[in-house]
Image (tube, rainbow, N blue to C red):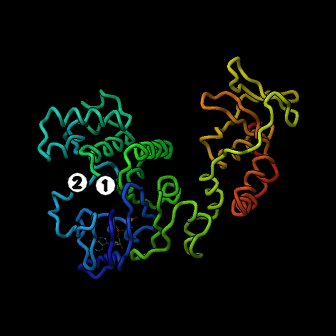
Amino acid sequence: MIRFDGAGKRHPDGTIAVEELDLTVPAGRTTVLVGPSGCGKTTLLRMVNRMVEPTSGRVLLDGTDVAQLEPAKLRRGIGYVIQQAGLFPHRRVLDNIATVPYLLGWDRKRARSRAMELLELVGLAPETAKRYPFQLSGGQQQRVGVARALAADPPLLLMDEPFSAVDPVVRAGLQEELLRLQAELNKTVLFVTHDIEEAVRLGDQIVVLREYGRIGQVADPATLLSAPADEQVAQFLGRDRGLRGLGLRPAAGIALLPAGQPHRGWTLTVDQDGRPTGWSGPGETVRQVTVYQPGLDTLRTALDSAVLSPARAAVAVDEDGRVLGLAAREAVLDALDAAGPQAVAAVAAAGDEIAGGGGRGR
Ligand SMILES: Nc1ncnc2c1ncn2[C@@H]1O[C@H](COP(=O)(O)OP(=O)(O)OP(=O)(O)O)[C@@H](O)[C@H]1O
């Protein structure tokens, strides 16, 4: 657990980066610091590993003031991932990952075998080990950065906008990967981003910061999106915060119609294994079928699938992609109703496209 106890930073030139912050970062969870540029996110993160020394207050790591710990030793016990990975350009991937184990005095064989394990854990092929960072894509470099941070199995990870230099598709993949790793490893993660979408996807706890490191709100994603503390936080979350909130609600429980029965003049076609192949309608066929998995996906995905379907029905599938039934748009809206007034208001605010029809797929 990390505790910021009145922690503040005033630079010698008089700039106040962080005024005075009280915050608890719980163990084994992901806490995301989010806020506009210059609000002090990086400063706070770096106070933890003593790359920045607070000018007031303290930072406690499991009850110990980090000021009492020797910086190099402290940092060897903390995984640190930064934007553009920050890999050593002259070292091969394997040796980059093994950096901290080497520093900790592990013998080379053990350090390298641990590095190979991590390469696999972050989804990189074994042959990547021999390459130099410049021979990797941005997304691969970030994966190596995460592997390096995890090498000595530290209980704490500091991540400073680790995925912001890669394109949106690669970024979504890296976020998925982090969620998967975190479900397995349960590290204490302190993650900095200025992207609220990323914060909502990754955070167990989100800290919305304003200028000078002042706290706007500390909450779990669902609470933050449904009940922002004030107008300023609501504005920061953006107009579609209600819709984003649907992304946190499971799509289980939507009433399904039998898939064999035509819906609004469209019939779903399936292959011999029961997987959807298209929609057959009056005089035309649509090959694109939008699906959702009730046990895995969210109301947002189900709604999106229903809106995009020519039959105005999302196709529910099991984990093997086999059709379970049709979720008519009305049934999805009923499920939104059951999810509470926030969800319904969000859809109303999203306007005609969803409430009235439209959508692609024709
Ligand atoms: N060495 C320094 N000297 C003076 N001011 C500084 C110094 N380092 C940072 N600052 C200022 O402290 C404030 C907080 O900086 P910080 O890097 O923590 O913000 P941030 O929220 O991480 O921003 P961004 O999202 O743009 O990375 C900014 O106003 C910055 O200009």
Residue sitting nearer the eye, 347 or 287: 347
Whole-number angstrom distance, CA of label 2 to CA of label 1: 8 Å
Residue, x 74% and y 43% (percent of image)?
Answer: 306
Residue sitting nearer the eye, 234 or 22: 22
Q: Position of residue 49 (x, y in %)?
A: 25, 62
Do residues under tags 2 and 1 come within 8 Å of each other at their CB atoms?
A: yes
For the N terminus, the quadrant is bottom left
Q: Quadrant of ligand 1?
A: bottom left
Q: Residue furthest bottom?
A: 14
Relative to residue 39, is residue 78 drawn left or right? Answer: left
Q: Which residue is mark 2?
A: 77
For the C terminus, the quadrant is top right
Of the residues under marks 2 and 1, which one precedes in the sequence?
2
Q: Which residue is mark 1?
A: 156
Residue, x 32% and y 75% (percent of image)?
Answer: 5
Relative to residue 106, is residue 298 drawn left or right? Answer: right
The amino acid beneath tag 1 is Leu
Residue at mark 2: C-beta within 8 A of ligand 1: no
User: In which quarter of the view is residue 265 placed?
Assistant: top right
Q: Position of residue 116 (x, y in %)?
A: 27, 32
For residue 165, above or below residue 209: above
For residue 161, above or below residue 276: below
Residue sitting nearer the eye, 84 or 343: 343
Residue, x 85% and y 31% (percent of image)?
Answer: 262
Determine whether the residue tagged by mark 2 lies in a helix, strand or loop.
loop
Mark 1 nearby-residue class (10 Å; few <14, some 14–19, many ≥20):
many
The amino acid beneath tag 2 is Gly
User: In which quarter of the view is residue 245 placed?
Assistant: bottom right
User: In which quarter of the view is residue 2 placed?
Assistant: bottom left
